[in-house]
Image: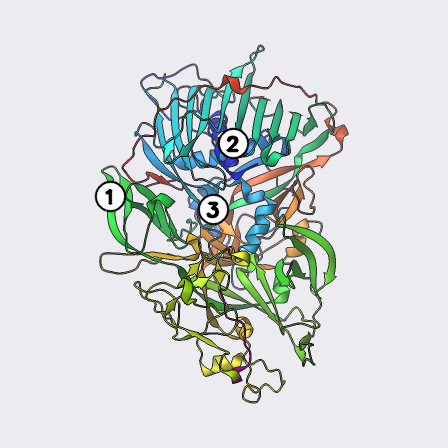
């Protein structure tokens, strides 16, 4: 299924609908037990859920969750009892839902529910047309994609956690307490590969809110996606369309029905019926999907039934039945909040909304986001916009946009024993392997499939430390914030003839130091050494292309200083008018002159550093073994990662996130935004039977980029049916290997302590013997047809001149 289809048809459609269904108040606007009594003179908003489960979540956590008190790190001793009872930590709501395979048709609904919640349509009711900037990364259903997880481990640029904004136009209205609540939405989606840009039209009409006897209410949702050709919406072509509605059957039961079909790279159809008791204790339903994307039709059809203790699922022909326990389950947290010592939410100065002409976007630590049509160039004027009762307020700024950015890396250390079993990505002879330290040896346990971009488990084997090209081991780890180096004690064997020399190294121990680096983007006004020197993977300026040629981006390595070619010196001036790394005066910006090849994400240089005498001596190759740089003066630039306390790298490429963009105010002062906060967290799990026991007492260095966004927990693939750990593949899900217990403490390395709390948790029912479901019976419901669809007919998208009234779920 295409990404476009997911974000468009499924997403919008189901979302809005089910949100309304699951959580709207009574017909009079409240959440009461009956909708028969309304006040026609009062209009209150009907709110909807942010997550929909076919079955309800349970109160106890699973065997796989960390349920013990968090370990203290050094002097850390902050606990939930230390914060006030009325603090954000205690007041922030925790959302828990159940994931089950037959309910995956509702996964897009949940993505939409999350996105719809960000529009704040309840708060904005009867305030006219407004724009809402939606961060789709907060709601992405691809968080559990094994392929996406594999790709992200290879895309090591610093922009991988940047927000992904879409601009929605919304109108939420209700005339009075006796009138329906109507929500109209216009959603823009950019073109992707062979799929044109889209505008999706959505209309939701709620005529009766939920009650004790009707858990959904009575409503109808219609949506349609039209392509945009040459800037014009072609309403004569429907790329997809669908309905979501509730209706009474002949026995008076309220049924939830959903139907959706279209063609985006292949025909697709989804149909769903759900009959659920008002208290969620029992229910049944049918699900059908057909997807021909890529020319290979895939058809699924399930019937389901459940009671308070078990959940039964089988194919439509009653084959392959499976039974699941509703009281025994595994648990995963997808989003976390971070709280200070006083219990308040921790926020980051990550950026603010901007406007250029009639286009709205965002500027922040990771750079600029604006639609391509805005065509922002260096020196342009944009406006910081805010929205209030008086309308839009705009403050002008000048854009400083450069084709690359310089990053500073500052060394940190820990021991191997403190990161036992943490996944470490290792590249050797063209293979991408996943390695771990098991307390005795480095062990290879997974390999990247370069076709599927998924990690595949392999027979565990010790990593050989003989015949090595370097005397150190170099890894990359999301859980440690990036590049990782382990220095080894080695013996150098010189080469003979055509046989190169090599290192043979001793096995390290738990107390062996591990070096990793904190990364910060260099901003105007920062101090940068001049010159910056490079010995390895050094970017090259090419006169003919006036920049870095994508097919010939770097100088060849040269370890011998005797020929005068071993080093490459660069200059960088950290002022808003410059901010470019230069090679002999030529700006080192990316130029695609025929294909990116292995540099498809752009170029990341080798280490650049201050060429002081002490730094140069520290990088002595020491091939003669005497430890004296003067006797055999060969310089090994690759040693920078292990020997120097600070170095720099230059990143450039075709993407906004590997370029530098900042704003200057009227005084010429460049604005600076906060980087993600790096946090040290020590995992606690004392149950020796738990899957995450292997991480008990292990340190992780997590990145916190804003409320709800905590990154760096290692993941693994599980079977979609059983939830058991399996090799990654097309029929698997990628989930975090552990859940951080609520109230766990962590530190930012500057004596600041914080509490962590899960904001959104998923429960997965555990597979049990089929005999447990013997009292449940399946019903094959008549599935709805898209023939029931009615054109939303909400008209052309209104022109909203004001800035976004809501950004990422926050009313401005």
Residue at the spot of label 1: 393
Whether 291 is among the magenta residues is no
Which residue is farthest bottom?
A: 631
Q: Secondary structure at mark 3?
A: loop
Residue at the spot of label 3: 708
Say whether residue 318 is left or right of residue 669. Answer: right
Q: Residue at x 69, y 74 (%)?
A: 506
Judge depth for marks 3 and 1 and give the one in front: 1
Q: Earlier in the sequence, mark 3 or mark 1?
A: 1
**Gap in angstroms between the C-alphas marked 3 and 1:** 28 Å
- Image coordinates of residue 469 in percent, x first then y, are 64, 72
- Which residues, given as a range, are shown in magenta? 553-562
Q: Residue at x 51, y 41 (%)?
A: 140
Which residue is farthest top?
A: 250
**Is residue 413 placed above or below 732 in the rendered structure?**
below
Say whether residue 502 is left or right of residue 45. Answer: right
Q: Secondary structure at mark 2?
A: helix
Crowd around label 2: few <14 · some 14–19 · many ≥20 (10 Å): many
Please name the predominant secondary structure of the magenta segment in the image: loop
* Residue 282 shows up from this direction: no
Which residue is farthest front?
A: 544
Which of the image's four quarters has the N terminus?
A: top right
Q: Which mark is residue 626?
A: none
Q: Which mark is residue 10?
A: 2
Say whether residue 749 is left or right of residue 119. Answer: right
Crowd around label 3: few <14 · some 14–19 · many ≥20 (10 Å): some
Q: Nearer the viewer, residue 621 or 113?
A: 621
Which of the image's four quarters has the C terminus?
A: top left
Q: Earlier in the sequence, mark 3 or mark 2?
A: 2
Crowd around label 1: few <14 · some 14–19 · many ≥20 (10 Å): few
**Gap in angstroms between the C-alphas marked 1 and 2:** 36 Å
- Image coordinates of residue 734 in percent, x first then y, are 61, 45
């Amino acid at each position: 299924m295409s990404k476009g289809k997911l974000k468009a048809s499924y997403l919008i459609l189901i979302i809005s609908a089910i949100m309304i269904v699951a959580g709207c108040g009574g017909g009079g606007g409240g959440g009461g037990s009956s909708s028969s009594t309304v006040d026609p003179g009062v209009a209150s908003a009907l709110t909807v859920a942010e997550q929909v489960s076919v079955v309800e979540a349970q109160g106890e956590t699973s065997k796989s969750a960390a349920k013990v008190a968090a370990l203290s790190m050094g002097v850390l001793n902050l606990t939930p009892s230390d914060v006030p009872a009325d603090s954000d930590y205690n007041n922030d709501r925790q959302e828990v839902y159940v994931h089950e395979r037959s309910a995956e048709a509702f996964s897009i609904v949940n993505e939409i529910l999350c996105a719809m919640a960000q529009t704040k349509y309840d708060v904005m009711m009867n305030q006219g047309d407004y724009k809402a900037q939606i961060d789709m990364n907060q709601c992405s259903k691809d968080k559990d994609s094994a392929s996406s997880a594999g790709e992200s481990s290879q895309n090591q640029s610093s922009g991988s956690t940047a927000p992904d904004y879409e601009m929605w136009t919304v109108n939420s209205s209700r005339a009075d307490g006796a009138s329906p609540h109507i929500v109209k939405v216009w959603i823009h989606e950019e073109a992707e590969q062979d799929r044109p840009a889209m505008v999706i039209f959505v209309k939701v009409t709620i005529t009766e809110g939920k009650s004790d006897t009707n858990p959904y209410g009575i409503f109808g949702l219609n949506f349609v996606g039209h392509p945009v050709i040459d800037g014009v919406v072609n309403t004569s072509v429907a790329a997809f369309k669908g309905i979501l509605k509730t209706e009474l059957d002949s026995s008076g039961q309220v049924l939830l029905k959903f139907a959706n079909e279209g063609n985006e790279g292949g025909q697709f159809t989804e149909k769903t019926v759900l009959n659920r008791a008002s208290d969620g204790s029992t229910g049944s339903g049918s699900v059908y999907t057909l997807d021909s994307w890529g020319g290979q039709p895939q058809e699924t059809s399930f019937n389901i039934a459940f009671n308070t203790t078990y959940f039964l699922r089988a194919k439509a022909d009653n084959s392959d039945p499976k039974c699941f326990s509703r009281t025994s389950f595994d648990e995963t947290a997808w989003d976390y909040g971070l709280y200070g010592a006083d219990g308040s939410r921790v926020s980051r100065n990550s950026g603010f909304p901007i406007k250029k002409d009639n286009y709205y976007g965002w500027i922040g630590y990771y750079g600029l986001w604006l639609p391509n049509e805005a065509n922002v160039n260096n020196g342009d004027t944009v406006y910081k916009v805010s929205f209030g009762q008086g309308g839009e307020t705009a403050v002008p700024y000048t854009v400083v946009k450069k084709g690359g950015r310089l990053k500073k890396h500052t060394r940190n250390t820990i021991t191997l024993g403190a990161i036992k079993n943490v996944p470490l990505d290792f590249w050797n002879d063209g293979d991408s392997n996943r390695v771990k330290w098991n307390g005795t040896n480095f062990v290879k346990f997974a390999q990247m499939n370069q076709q599927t971009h998924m990690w595949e488990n392999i027979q565990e084997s010790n990593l050989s430390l003989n015949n090595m090209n370097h005397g150190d081991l170099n890894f990359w780890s999301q859980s440690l914030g990036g590049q990782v180096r382990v220095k080894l004690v080695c013996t150098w064997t010189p080469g003979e003839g055509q046989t190169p020399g090599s290192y043979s190294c001793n096995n390290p121990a738990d107390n062996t130091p591990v070096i990793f680096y904190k990364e910060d983007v260099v901003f105007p006004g920062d101090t940068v050494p001049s010159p910056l020197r490079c010995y390895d993977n050094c970017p090259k300026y090419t006169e003919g292309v006036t920049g870095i040629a994508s097919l010939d981006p770097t100088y060849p390595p040269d370890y011998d200083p005797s020929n005068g070619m071993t080093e490459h010196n660069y200059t960088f001036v950290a002022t808003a008018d410059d901010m470019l790394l230069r090679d002999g005066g030529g700006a080192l910006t990316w130029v695609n002159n025929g294909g990116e090849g292995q540099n498809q994400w752009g170029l990341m240089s080798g280490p650049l550093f201050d060429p002081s005498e002490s730094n140069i001596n520290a990088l002595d190759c020491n091939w003669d073994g005497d430890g004296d740089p003067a006797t055999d003066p060969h310089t090994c630039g690759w040693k920078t990662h292990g020997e120097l306390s600070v170095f720099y790298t230059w990143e450039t490429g075709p993407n906004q996130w590997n370029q530098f963009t900042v704003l200057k105010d009227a005084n010429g002062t460049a604005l600076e935004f906060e980087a993600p906060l790096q946090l040290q967290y020590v995992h606690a799990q004392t149950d020796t039977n738990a899957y995450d026991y292997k991480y008990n007492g292990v340190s992780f260095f997590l990145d916190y980029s804003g409320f709800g966004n905590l990154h760096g927990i290692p993941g693994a693939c599980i079977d979609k049916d059983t939830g058991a750990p399996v090799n990654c593949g097309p029929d698997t899900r990628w989930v975090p290997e552990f859940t951080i217990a609520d109230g766990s403490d962590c530190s930012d390395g500057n004596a600041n302590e914080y509490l962590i709390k899960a904001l959104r948790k998923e429960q997965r029912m555990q597979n049990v013997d089929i005999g447990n479901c013997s009292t449940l019976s399946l019903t094959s419901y008549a599935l709805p047809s898209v023939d029931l669809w009615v054109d939303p007919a909400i008209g052309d998208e209104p022109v909203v001149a004001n800035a976004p009234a809501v950004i990422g779920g926050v009313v401005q």
